[in-house]
Structure formats: structure tokens, C-alpha cells
Amino acid sequence: MKLNSLYAIIIALLGIGALTSCEDNTSPIGGSLVNNEVKITVDTIEMKLTASSVYEADFDSRTQTKLLGRINVPEYGSLDCSFVSQMLTATKMNIPDSIKVEDVDSMRMVLKVPRGSLTGDSLAPQQLKVFGLTKQLPSDIDSSFDPTGFYDPQNPLGIKSYTLSALSMNDSLFQLGSDISIPVMMPRKMAQDIFTQYREKPEIFQWPQTFAQYFPGVYVEQNFGNGCIGVISNMEFWLYWRYQKQVYQKKDDDSGDYEYVWQTARDSVCLMSSRPEVLSANRVVYKVSDYLKNLADSGKSIITTPGGYYVDINFPAQQLIDQYDRDLYSSAVVSKLSFEIPAKEVKNDYGLPVAPHLLMVKKSEREAFFRENKVPDGKTSFYAPYDEETGSYTFTGMRDYILEIIKNGSASAEDTEFSLIPVIVTTEVVQGYTSTTTYVTGCSPYIGRPTMTELDTDNAIILFTYSRQTIE
């Protein structure tokens, strides 16, 4: 029995050894049929771009943002800004029927300047004039528009002296208010005439076009002052009226009793405002300094706002795909293409910064881009914010652009010639289940404030990423 048990144990151990031996010698058949690997190439290429500064005397200045004032900066030049605007009206005047035309006592135009959105000295004394337009504004208006003949310079609607400092505000307004208001008194007759039209001819106010026939708009100019330019975010016209109301209050005697007494009260309503739905444009007179001219003429890539210089470049797309010709035209998959340009502000004593965003658009499509209110599409146009940490603009999402060139086999001159233009970008963030997506809803020439930017096009950086599967 003991020998039989020992024999059984030996047989079992031999079986285990046999199983182990089979596991160590797994057959290579199958695995050797396809021997492949995926090679991911990430290249950071520093390139010197062919670039030139281009001076543009006139540009599309139609925007909701308005500039008003004058400055003279030795490094920048001189800038004089005014604006014209049509008005969008309320379709209904929300005033009680008991209010008569004789109760209307005034109208004020109120300009809103966001705190901190100015260039220059906020304490500099300023004065503006408001004129009513006498005929319709041209639809193709630009920055060089001359308002002469569109208004009566001898009959301003209002004149206002002001500063853009918040020092005159009381403590509560300073803490709560995000804007500095500039109220300008309008003629009482204007207020009563508009009130009467609302009552007698309400159809005038149903559409911007019909109201523009009655009231073409306003022209606002800087009448006095230098050294400060403010950004006006909104313009509104408020109608004021007086009425009698009963107030329950304590009697003047010592009885402690209360009584109703008649008092004069005041109320108001906003009837007109400047909105994106109606035409509004800046008149910009910019004389570039000799300092900037010399920089541009010496080959520096200079960009200014509002108006002035932008930069044309040649993007080295053909050079890029030639460098990876064998890979890209075989089985490569392009993952990413981005383009970074170092930038800095042109040194000045007024603190003029760099442009906040740049648009990179094909030179052949530059004018149509703004005329047709397009947004960057990632194929012929791209945008980049200025990154203060890296001191550069980085254009991402250029994959579709380079794929189209690879598909066509080569890059034409039109494919590689781009313009770099300062813009203001409007975005909308959509929240998803697991992520958020940012959509660009608007892109227009930047007229926010004076800026000076010098691009280092000699040290542009291209980041190119693609993968390739090698099959043996």
C-alpha cells in the first residue's frame, strides 16, 4: 500500500511537470504573422517667418463699443475718437395714461463707462457735445467717416463737462457701481415731441427703420479736453415726468395722528438705447508716431489699435509637410498643429498694453471675414488670446487646415498668406454632461482701447503632432 501511494505521488508530480513545460513553450504561430508598432512624432519647430507690417488708414468701425476722447502718446501717436449711432426704441411707452405731455419735464442721454476701461488720466477735464443727425447714415460707414453735412453744428442737443474719475461718487455708489455715468440733458421740446409721437403715432416705434426716418440718430464728439479716452459700453435716453400722489404721513402737530397729503413725485423710463440691432460706428482719427513708423520700416512686426498697423505673414505649411513627406503621404494620422508667436508691448509711459486677441485669417479672405460677420472656422481663420505667462499668442486647432493641404498635395500661395489682426471675440460656454464647450459667436476688429504690440516673428514656434503605424 505504501509503495502504491508513493508511485501515485510520483506520477502526479510528473504530470504537473509536463503541464509546466507546455506553458513555457507557447507556439509563436499567429503573433509573428503581423509585427507592428505605432510611432508618435511630436516636433517643436522654431521658424523665422516672412512678415511685414501693413498700415491701414480706414477700417470697419461698426461696433457696439464706442470710444470718446483724445490722447497724445510720444511712442504711439495722436488719437481722436468720436462716434455716431442710430437708436433702438421701446415698442411701447410704459407711462400711465393719466400723464399728460405737460407733465414731461426733461430727457437725459446717459453714457455708461465701465470703471477702469479708459486710457490716460481719469482726472483730465473733458467736455462733449451731442448733435442730432439730420439724414440717414451710410450703410458702408467706416472709421474715416466725416459727419460734416449730417448734423447742424450750431444746434447741439446737449453739452456736458465731465471726468472719468470715480472720486466724485459717494462710498456706496463707488462700492456697488460698475460704471461711471455721464448724464447729458436734452431739450425739453425733444422729450415732449417723442412723448407725443408715442401717443399719436405708435407705429413709428415698431421697427428701427421707421424710427430712423423720424430720428436718424446722434453724433457725439469731444468738444474740449485731452489726455483721456473712455470706452462707452452703453448709451440710453431716459424720459422724466412729474405727477401728484398721496402720501400717508404724520401730521406736523403734536397730536401723533397721520393724514394723507399730496406730494409731487418723479418717475422715468428708458425709451431709446444704442444696441447691436442698429447701426453704430466710431470715427477714429489716428496719426501714427514717427517712432512706430521707424520700427515698422526697419522690419519689426507692429500691430496697433484702434486701426493703424496689422501684420501679414507667410505660414510655412509647404516646408512643414515637405519635412515629413514620406510619413504624411503614407499612413500617418495628424493629431495636432498649433502655432505660437512671442509678443510684447511697445514700451511707453501711458501703459498701453498688447492686443488681447489676434485673428489669423487668410489674406485673401480678410475683408470678407469682417464684412460677412464670420467667426474663426479652424480652416481658413483662427484666433488666439494673449497669454501673459508665456508672453505669446498660440493658435490652436489648425489640424483641418494642414489636412486640406495634404489632401491637395501641395500648398498654394493663397494657402500660406495670412493676416494677423487684433480682434474682440465673443464666446458662449455650453455645459455638457462631462465637459464644457466654448463656441465663438462673434469676432470683430478690436476697438476697446489703444494698444501697441510687437510680434517676434523671428522666433515663431510650430508644434506638429502625428502618428504612424509601421507594419512589417
Image: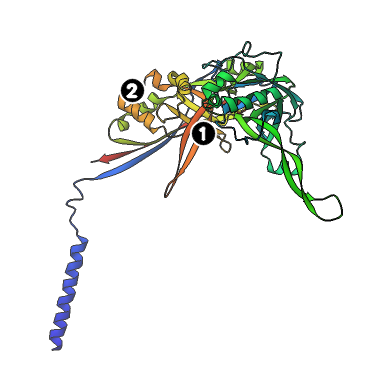
Q: Quadrant of the N terminus?
A: bottom left
Residue 389 as seen in the image, left or right of residue 155: left
Dot 2 amino acid type = Ser
Q: Which mark is residue 124?
A: none
Q: Secondary structure at mark 1?
A: strand
Residue at image mark 2: 410
Q: Quadrant of residue 424?
A: top right
Q: Nearer the viewer, residue 278 or 375?
A: 278
Q: How many marks?
A: 2
Dot 1 amino acid type = Thr
**Dot in front, 2 or 1:** 1
Vertical arrangement, residue 17 with respect to residue 460, above or below: below
Q: Quadrant of the C terminus?
A: top left
- Crowd around label 2: few <14 · some 14–19 · many ≥20 (10 Å): some
Indicate which disc, 2 or 1, sits on the residue closer to the N terminus.
2
Q: Which mark is residue 426?
A: 1
User: What residue is shown at x 19% (from left), y 60% (from top)?
Assistant: 25
Q: CA distance from mark 2 to mark 1?
A: 34 Å
Residue 33 on image: x %, y %: 18, 46
Q: Residue furthest right?
A: 254
